[in-house]
Image (cartoon, rainbow, N blue to C red):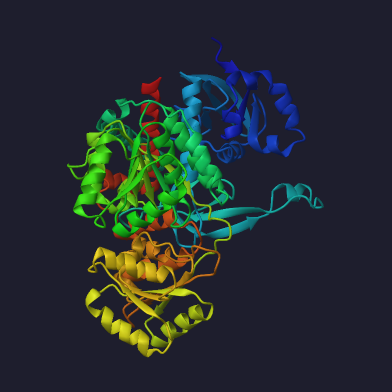
Amino acid sequence: MENRLSNVLIVSITPYFLEKEFFWFQENIKTILQSAKTQAFWQDNILFLEKDQKISISEVLKKIDELGYEKVFKTTQPGEFSQIGGIIEIFSINSQFAVRLDFLGNRIESIERLNIEVENEKISKELLKKKLKSQKIFSDLKGLKSGDYLVHLDHGVARYTGKSETINQNTEQNPNDQNIKPKEYYVLEYAVGDKLYVPVGLERKLNRYIGFTEPKLSRLGGILWQKTKKKIKEDTEKLAKDLLEMFAQKEICQRPAYLREEIFETLSSGFPYKLTPDQEETLRDIKENLKLLKPMDRIVCGDVGFGKTEIALRVAGLSAENGKQTALICPTTILASQHYQTFKKRFANLPVNIALLSRLQTAREKQTIKEKLKSGEIDIVVGTHSLLAKSIEFKNLGLLIIDDEQKFGVKQKEILRTKYPHIDVLSLSATPIPRTMYLALSSLKEMSFIQTPPQGRKAIKTYVLPFKKEVIKKAIEAELARNGQIYFLHNRIGTLPFFKQLLEDLGTQAKIGILHSKLKEQEIIKTLSDFQIGKTNLLLTTTIIENGIDITNANTLIVDNATRLGLSQAYQLRGRIGRGTQQSFAYFLYPKGQLKGLAKQRLTALKQAEELGSGYKIATQDMEIRGAGNILGKEQSGSVNRIGLNLYCQMLGEAVEKLKTNICH
């Protein structure tokens, strides 16, 4: 076969081009080149090169970078390119084979076909689409500030120094053209003061550096980074094999597909609000999972109050309609009770039996519920970890929903799955723990993000201040003046009476209720009920309110000695307010002179994450502050430090996807 070519077309790595088959490009090459003469889309998204064309290698490399190709040590896969001296090797996504470009000065001396080919076009495109989706998740740069460390896919670890506007090169040639706008760039600083300008719009090549130590800046332009990536990629491929063997049992299990949807549609039509785009996409993904024979294992990650319960409710209805039982497990009795009431209300006119199993029931009531679960008379059971007891038997358990999954240990979460290996698992989390993030983002679990706030929701104004009675009094009076309610959090049961007296002495006329975990279950429910109906308007409480409190009229949170809280916990507590359309206010108070070290980092991160939908970011920062614990063994921690956890997980995810896809085909 003649390996010499007269020209080559390289297209950008975008969903538009990934949808097209190789022969489409061959058939339409003339139309594409004609369009590129006048249309901006084609000018921006293709590179057409010919033998003997006069063009510098730096121009070609810049364009290849902008088209989204990844620079590697040696080109082996579609979407990659490598460069040594005056030679570029590139595997374009619109071609079945890689090519080699030889430059002599500023001229392309030859274009040669390489003996590196696509084995299966469908698999290749599937993997690239998943890679694009993964990169989008990892390249969230919201709240980026000067001094933050970033990892560039092609060039390594750098320090972000800000944004810069650079005038487009064409301006010099056409100084009177008013349509030419300056381009904006992320400015990255590398070792020895080298700088790289990354165009805004090419964020998918960037991600935040998260590691266990202060990172070492990479050198710009060398091959060390490409060698490092190559070595770590090989390591992740070995780890992927080990992990897949661990999860193999779950992969081979099968259950009947979910085919009926009448109850699901009834629940959907009875919902008084419009779903957000993220909720709609999550439900679509879950329904697609349930139409397959392989059991689902999906995490839905969304901020408190962003509609995860509605997702769970509809999926439970789908399960009941298809003849399967659902167990919804919650970390607290309060949350279980709230979910039970919500489910009872929404399923009121449907042929679905719902039960609550927690410490609120008598021994006799519990026994009756257990018998009905075993006989199949109960379709959906809501409860605490008591649902994991050996004495609980189901007739046909098909769906396990774990709310606030970060509150349950790994062994707890595996109890029911071990007993019923064919069940579908839906985990809900506002701030996924590092282990879960690691598994989810490395493709061993599927993950959905609900980041769009419900209509009318406002960001919570957050203040981090030293403890002062004047601040507390002013905050309480402002909320009471608009007939609102307040949570005052003091996390020591023994000194709650002292704080009650302190609050009364402020003279705000607040009606105070006290809530903590040592109260009897019935007292807890009554105290919450009094607060819900407005009998009390200030709830003096411990962190017991962290889960399951949804009162739209409570829009001020005051936290005493916030330095004692973990970051994810503080974020979760802040989510108790701002659940309606009212502006809400959170005050995190600290003893004077005691805001330092990790506590300062946590509260600074909380203040910076005021914007709605910051739960995923908080989980990531929490991991950065605490260290990644035992997510990875010592073997992997060195690799993580060299390229950052985000890129490591991305590589591991690609390795897992490649293995899974090849096994399936």
Q: Nearer the viewer, residue 247 or 126?
A: 247
Labels in figure, total: 0
The residue nearer to you, when weighing 617 against 266, is 266
Which of the 4 image quarters holds residue 636? top left
Residue 320 point in image, percent of width and height: 39, 36
Relative vertical location of residue 164 with respect to residue 372 in this rendering, above or below: below
Res. 191 visible in picture:
no
Q: Which residue lies furthest to the top in this view?
A: 1
Pick whichever, 101 or 42, lies toward us: 42
**Of the pair 551 and 412, the residue shown nearer to us:** 551
Q: Quadrant of residue 38?
A: top right
Residue 443's image quarter?
Answer: top left
Q: Residue at x 53, y 52 (%)?
A: 452
Q: Residue at x 74, y 36 (%)?
A: 39
Residue 340: % across, % down: 37, 52
The reply to whether residue 398 is visible in this rendering is yes
* Quadrant (top left, top right, bottom left, bottom right) of the C terminus: top left
Residue at image point 58% right, 37% down: 67
Rendered position, 54 above or below 607: above
Q: Is residue 572 left or right of residue 371?
A: right
